[in-house]
Amino acid sequence: MNQKTKGIFLLGLWKDNPVFRQILGICSALAVTNLMVNSFVMGLGLIFVTAFSELTVSIIRQYTPKHIRMMVQTLIISAYVIIVDIFLKAYFPSISEALGPYVGLIITNCIIMGRCESYAQNNPPYYAFMDGIASGAGYAIVLLIIAFVRELLGFGSLFGISILGESWTSWTLMIMPPGAFFMLAIIIWISKNMIDDEKEENGGAKA
Amino acid sequence: MATHKKKVVYPIVFMVMVTSIFTLFLAVINELTYDTIQEQSRIKTQSKLLYSLDIDYEDSDESILNTYNKYITEKSTDDYTYYIAEENGQVIGYAFEVRGSGLWGQIRSYLAFDDSFDELKGVDFISHSETPGLGGRIDERWFVDQFKGIELTQSADGEYLIFKPSIGGNIDSITGATSTSKAVRTIFNENIEEILQVKEEVIDESKN
C-alpha cells in the first residue's frame, strides 16, 4: 500500500469520515443500527456499491459528457444497488426483510454520489476504487459502533448472541429511534473534540 | 454548427449505450437468481401459514418445507383458497387466504380457524404496503398474536373483532395508524362472516 492509498484511508475512516465529519448517510445510519447484523450487512452493501460505482465512474470519466455526468452516475449507482438487493433477496432473505426499504435507498445515500462527484470524476480508477472502500468502511465502522452500544444495551446481545444474560434489563429507548439520535450525537461530539485537538497540537487554527 | 450538433448526439448515444450495458447486466443477474428468489418467497409464505395455524416449526428452510408437507392440504371453494391442517388424521385447523384494501394497497393475510370454527387460531400477514413504522407495524408479533383464540360464537352483527376500549373490545389497535387498523378489522370481520357461512361445506370436504 503506497502513501497515497494510506492517505485515502486516513481521510475516509477518520479525518473526513462520511458520517461524523461530513454528516452524510445519516438517515440509514439511524435506521438500521438497532442490530449489529443489520449494520454489518448495510456496511458491506455500501462498501460494495461505493467502491464499484467509483471505479466505473472513474473508468468512463473521460468519455462522459460533463453535463450529463449526474445522470450517468445515478444510473451506475442504481445498477449496483439493485445487484446488492437481488443478492440479499436470493441468499439472505431474512436480512433482506429486516433491512426492508433501506437497501433500495442506498441509491439515495449521499456518500456515494458525493464521492463519485468529488473524487472518482477526477482520479484514476485504482484510487477511486480505494476511495470507495475507504468511505464505505468509514460509514460501516460508525454504524457498527452505534449498533454495538444499541444492541448491547437494548437487547443485551451482540450479533444476536446473548452477552449480558437473562437478568439484564433492556433499555427499550436504545432500540427505538431516539437511541440512534443520542448515540450518533455522542459520536459526532467525541470525534469533533478529538479531531480539533489534533489540529491544535499541530499548531493549526485556534479559535 | 457541426460541434453543436455533435454535443447533442454524443450524450444521447453515450447514455443509450451505458443504459443498455447495465440493463443487460442486470437482466442476466435477475434471470440467474429468479428461481432462488421465488423459492425463498414460497418458503416465507408457507412459514406464515404455519404460524397462523399455530404449528411449531424450526427456523430453517428444510424444516418449514417438511412441516408444511406433513400437516397441510390445499383446497379451494368458489371464493377462497384454503388449507386444512391435519395431525395424525385429525383436523386441527383451517386457514384461509383473505385479501382486502389497506391504506395504500392490498393487504393479504391468512386467517386460521380451529377445527369447529368456534375460535380464531391465529392470523399472519402475507403482504401489505402500509407505511413502514406506522401501519407497517401490523407485522409485529404483539399485534398478530392478539388474534389467537378470539371467540367467534357469541358475536352479533358480524363484529367479531372490536378495538379496545370499546365495549366488548378484544384487540388493541396500532397507535398512529388508525386507517390501517380499521382496514385490517374490516377485512377480517367481513371475511370471517363469509367464511363462517361456508364452514359446513369446508368441514364436510375435509372428511372425504
Image (cartoon, helix red, strand yellow):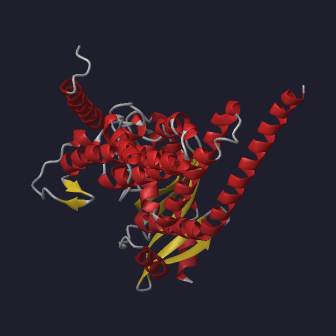
For the point 44% across and 78% down, the residue is B62
Whole-percent x, y for residue B113 in the image: 45, 64
Q: Is residue B88 left or right of residue B197?
A: left
- The residue most toward the bottom is B88
Q: Is residue A152 left or right of residue B59?
A: left
Q: Which quarter of the figure is the C terminus of chain B placed in? A: bottom right
For the point 50% across and 44% down, the residue is A106
Vertical position of residue A117 compared to residue B24: above or below: above
From the viewer's side, name the closer residue of B97 and A105. A105
Res A194 → quadrant: top left
Q: Is residue B139 left or right of residue B36?
A: left
Whole-percent x, y for residue B142 in the image: 33, 50
From the viewer's side, name the closer residue of B85 and A16. A16
Q: Which quarter of the figure is the N terminus of chain B placed in? A: top right
- The residue most toward the left is A167
Vertical position of residue A67 compared to residue B110: above or below: above
Residue A192 visible in the displayed image: yes
Res A205 → quadrant: top left
Residue B190 visible in the displayed image: no
